[in-house]
Image (cartoon, helix red, strand yellow):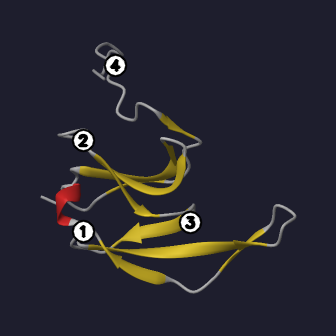
Amino acid sequence: MDADGGNVRLVLPGITDTGILKWSPTGRVLAFVGTYRDAGGIWLLDVETSQVTRVWPSRAGFDWSPDGRQMVVLPWKSDGRGNREPIQPVIIDVPSEAGRG
C-alpha cells in the first residue's frame, strides 16, 4: 500500500493460519508458514506473478540461504498435547520456477 494507507494490495489471498513470513534474499519471493487450499506447509509467493508454490508439506521453522537457492527447514515433532519440539534440520533446494529470479 501507499505510505498514506491508500492502494492496499492483498498479497496472500486464500492463505489462512499464516505464521512465519520472510523475504527471499532477492526480494521477489515471500516465504511463509500457513495453510493454502486446505494444505499446510511452507509456501513461496512470487510477488511479481502471484504464483504460490509449496516447498515443505507441514508447518516448520525455516530460513533462506544467502543466495536464495536453498532453505534450511527445522521440522517440528508434536508430543500429542500441543507441545512441539524441533527435530533435525533439513536443507532443501528452492524450485527455480518459484521465482528466485
Looking at the image, tell me whether mark 1 or mark 3 is earlier in sequence order: 3
Name which residue lies at 36% across and 16% down. Answer: 5
Looking at the figure, which quarter contains the N terminus? top left
Q: Which residue is mark 3?
A: 60
Q: Is residue 48 left or right of residue 56?
A: left
Name which residue lies at 41% across and 30% down. Answer: 13
Q: Which residue is mark 2?
A: 47
Answer few, some or many: residues within 10 Å of disc 4's Cα (few below 14, many 20 plus, some between 14 and 19).
Answer: few
- The amino acid on which the numbered mark 2 sits, given as a three-letter code, is Val
Q: Position of residue 7 (x, y in %)?
A: 28, 15
Looking at the image, tell me whether mark 2 or mark 4 is earlier in sequence order: 4
Q: Which residue is mark 1?
A: 68
Q: Tag on residue 8? A: 4
The image quadrant that residue 4 belongs to is top left
Looking at the figure, which quarter contains the C terminus? bottom left
The answer to whether 34 is drawn above or below residue 98 in the figure is: above
Mark 4 and mark 3: span between their CA atoms? 29 Å
The answer to whether 50 is drawn above or below residue 66 in the figure is: above
The answer to whether 28 is drawn above or below residue 88 in the figure is: above
Mark 3 and mark 2: span between their CA atoms? 22 Å
Answer few, some or many: residues within 10 Å of disc 3's Cα (few below 14, many 20 plus, some between 14 and 19).
Answer: many
Mark 2 and mark 1: span between their CA atoms? 15 Å
Q: Nearer the viewer, residue 1 or 86?
A: 86
Q: Secondary structure at mark 1?
A: loop
The image quadrant that residue 77 belongs to is bottom right
